[in-house]
Every structure is written in C-alpha cells, then in structure tokens.
Amino acid sequence: MDRKNFIKKSLLAGIAGALLPHSSKAKSNKEKSTYDKLMKQVGFNHLPNEKGVTTMNTVLHKANTRGQANHGWLEARHSFSFASYQNPDRMHFGVLRVLNDDRIAPSRGFSTHPHDNMEIISIPLEGALEHKDNMGNGAIVKDGDVQVMSAGTGITHSEFNANKDQDMKLLQIWLFPNKRNVVPRYDQISIKDIEKKNAFYQVLSPSSKDQGVWIHQDAWFHLGRFDRETTTNYKINKPGNGVYAFIIEGTAEIEGQHLERRDGFGIWNTHEFKVKACSGSRILLMEVPMEIS
C-alpha cells in the first residue's frame, strides 16, 4: 500500500470519529487509542534535519489551503490532517498534531467521547463552551480563557456551545505528550490578569510553577494582541524546539514572510526570530519539540 493510501485509510478509520458526535456506548477493547491512531500517521514531514544542519527552516500554510468540513452545525478548518481531510504533506509540526479552527452553532456540540495520551488545549475566540467530563469537572470556557486536558490513561468528555442564540468559535490544539499514561487532569485559567498590551505573554508551559496553564510536554505558548505596529524578538526556550505561529486576526511578518488572517507559519533550526505584528493583529505562538518521543 503506498503512503498516500495508507494515510487516507488510517485517517478515515482512526480519527473520523473524533470530529463528529460520539455515542455513549463503550468502545471495544480492541479499538486503538487516540495516541496510537495519531502516532501511526507521523514522520513524513516537519521533523528535524540531519544532525549538524543548522540552517533556519520554515513552512507556510496559507489559510485557504487548510482542510475544510461543513456539517451545518459545525464548520471546521484543519491546519493538519484530521477526519475526512487527509494530506500526507500536512500531518504535523513536531509534536503539534492537531490545530482545528471551529465554529459551533448555538446549543450544538460534541457528545461524550473518549481520548487518551494527548495534551488537549482549547482557546475560545468568541462565545462560550460548556465542558463536562468523567473526572467530575463541569465548566464554562469563554473567550479570554485557556483550557487544558491531559488525557493520560483515558478520559471522556463532552463540549457544547453554551449559548442558545450565537455561534461560538474556538481553536482546539492537540500535542503528543512526553509522558504516556499519566493521571488525567483538567485545568483552565482566565488570561485577563496576565494579558499584556502590545506584547506577547505566556499562557502555557511545562511547569505548574510558571505563568499560565501547564502540560506534559516541553512546550510554551504565547498570545499577543496588538493595536499598534510592534516588533519582537522571540527566543526559543529549549534547543531543538520550533515555533508554529498562527495569525488569529490581522497581519504580521515573521523573518520577512508576510502573513494574513488564519495563516500558519512554522519555523525551526533557529535560536530566535523576529515577529513584526501589525496594528489590529492577534497572534498565537506555539513553541513545541520537533522530535516526537
């Protein structure tokens, strides 16, 4: 079986169910885990160069090249292969495996479904999301919050638009963890107390003692909202990591590459790089390991 057909078969069989509502019926013991399904599909792109090669590398994903799905109540854009969208050249960026840009209709959402051994980050952009899980958590996650789940040994949860009269929009991000089968955990924060004007500020890291939420991965996320042109030098926190920038709103320039709304831009094999944020922009920087352990 050639690589393209292998990936297509794996995606359709493996993660199509992650996008659509799930039944509450228990999964078969023979069904593979979230981690195993997605790990089968990595390794074809955006991994480090040969040792000793230090030239900066970049990859550009324009907004209009993303995968698309429209289920009426759900409109989704996929920066990386997910569900019915399969592209062997867009599988992952290092440990960053899923970046979904979703719009959910009023009172609609994802019924109870399972995950394991994934670090799952949700960033609402408009409206509010109602979350419930088998750990006893029930929460409303709204614009201005960041939510994380370490799925670990296994969780089940549901997610619905908490509003009856307006759409909600969010980014959902999945990372491969650096530790498998950890105790599942849930957390969320409001970023209002840490948000900075015209600057990037940290919202996620590997340490529970650091600013923002934390996950089981050597990853650092920074958000920035800009009402004037601002230039920043971003320094990599851990050697060997890369950064995937996502332009939520507005425009920006990274190392001379012009970027527009919902464009994605990966950069690696560098210690630092320059970000020029234009007025009216909102940007998410996701620093992640380029090697999958």
Image (cartoon, grey):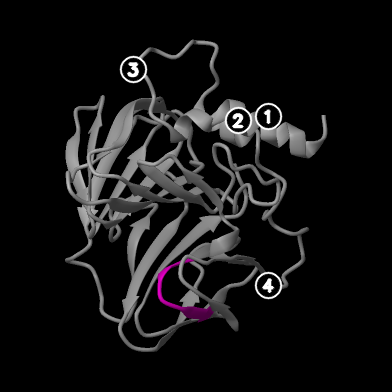
- The structure residue drawn at horizontal position 44% and vertical position 14%, both measured from the top left corner, is 27
SS for tag 4?
Answer: loop
Quick one: 109 or 232, which is closer to the camera?
A: 109
Say which residue label 3 marks.
24
| Residue, disc 1 | 9
Tell me the kind of residue under disc 4: Met
- At label 1, counting other C-alpha atoms closer than 10 Å, the crowd grade (few under 14, some 14-19, many 20 or more) is few
Residue drawn 37% across the image and 13% down it: 25
Amino acid type at circle 2 is: Leu
Residue 109 picture quarter: top left
Residue 113 visible here: yes
Q: Secondary structure at mark 2?
A: helix
Q: Earlier in the sequence, mark 3 or mark 2?
A: 2
CA distance separating discs 3 and 1: 25 Å
Q: Which residues are magenta?
A: 246-253
Image quadrant where one finds the C terminus: top right
For the residues labelled 2 and 1, say whether their Cβ atoms are less than 8 Å apart.
yes
Measured in 3D between alpha carbons, the distance from the residue under mark 2 to the one under mark 4, in whole angstroms, is 34 Å
Q: Which residue is mark 4?
A: 56
Is 256 placed left or right of 235 in the picture?
right
